Amino acid sequence: MSTYFLLILIFILLAINILLLQKYSRYKQRYKQQGLFGKWPIRQISIEEFDSIFKTNELGPTLATEVHFIGRGSLHVPGGTSDTEAWVLSALAKKSDQIFEFGTCTGKTTYLLAKNSPTQARITTITLAPDQLNSYERSAGDSKKSTDDAVAESAFINFLYSGTPEEKKITQLFGDSKHFDEKPFAHQMNLIFVDGSHAYSYVLSDSEKAFNMVAPNGIILWHDYRGTQDTADVFKAMNLLSKNKKLVHLKDTSLIAYRAEA
Ligand SMILES: C[S@@+](CC[C@H](N)C(=O)[O-])C[C@H]1O[C@@H](n2cnc3c(N)ncnc32)[C@H](O)[C@@H]1O
């Protein structure tokens, strides 16, 4: 066999190996929630370990976690929560009086938070309206994909909760979250969902505000901790934050969780 053909053969074998490695890496991230060479930096725990409401008995999850629910079945909603994540958020809302959400999008989670929370609860949610896109502040470390996604998802001014009885529990804020002043809400929120722009600088900025707003014993949840493939900026920002905060990754979800000290 000539050297030329040998080189082509080596090249083809190398290309196949790279493709297989990429596929395997995707599989590990999606289904095993691990990187190619091992575990992700934030420790995984079960939802039962994180909050006693999820404690199971011999029949499985108890009625303590019974919620009003809208499933998504096989429909893939970009940026939307999985059915497990929606259930976790809804169950935790049952014992939360003050709830804050970064990133309203279709308002499905906002609606579930309002529907499942106690009658006196208030839900405040912030989102960027389509006519406010010029206030979006991209920073140097933000990936183009996360910026494009944030802009594309800023398309809503009507929400799933609009016109429902739950609307009276909800305060809808429109604006760029970097410009949002969280001081009036300091130490007040029992449950915070960080799911706005997934760009690196925004995850850090929204998280800092969330840490300022969380009440003693309150919970912060972040969406889309999925490794380096789809939402790499979230992965990078959360791994950085985990160096100074006790963060855990809830098994079988893309949720990162934090509980403030009592
Ligand atoms: C992934 S979606 C949120 C999904 C929603 N939490 C849910 O569970 O259905 C991201 C949302 O963040 C909003 N967003 C993006 N950039 C923002 C910014 N700079 N300030 C405020 N909201 C922003 C988008 O408009 C979009 O509504």
Image (cartoon, rainbow, N blue to C red):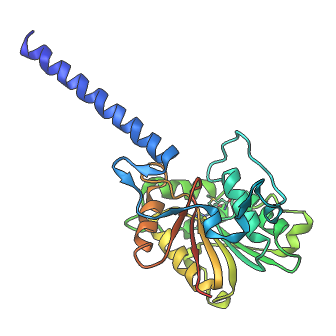
Q: Residue at x 47, y 64 (%)?
A: 43
Give the image location of residue 59, x and y in percent. 78, 53
Hey, which residue is sitting farthest front in the picture?
Answer: 58
Question: Is 24 situated above or below 136?
Answer: above
Specify the quadrant that holds the C terminus: bottom right
Number of numbered discs: 0
Give the image location of residue 84, x and y in percent. 68, 54
**Quadrant in which residue 134 is drawn:** bottom right
Can you see residue 12?
A: yes
Hey, which residue is sitting farthest left in the picture?
Answer: 3
Q: Residue at x 49, y 47 (%)?
A: 32
**Quadrant in which residue 4 is drawn:** top left
- Judged from the image, the quadrant occupied by ligand 1 is bottom right
Q: Residue at x 46, y 40 (%)?
A: 27
Q: Is residue 51 left or right of residue 170?
A: left
Along the viewing direction, whichever of 195 and 73 lies nearer the viewer:
73
Along the viewing direction, whichever of 29 and 114 lies nearer the viewer:
29
Give the image location of residue 234, x and y in percent. 48, 62
Q: Is residue 50 left or right of residue 247?
A: right
**Quadrant in which residue 8 is drawn:** top left
Can you see residue 194?
A: no
Q: Residue at x 40, y 75 (%)?
A: 243
Hey, which residue is sitting farthest right in the picture?
Answer: 165
Give the image location of residue 12, x and y in percent. 24, 23
Question: Is 80 situated above or below 206?
Answer: above
Specify the quadrant that holds the N terminus: top left
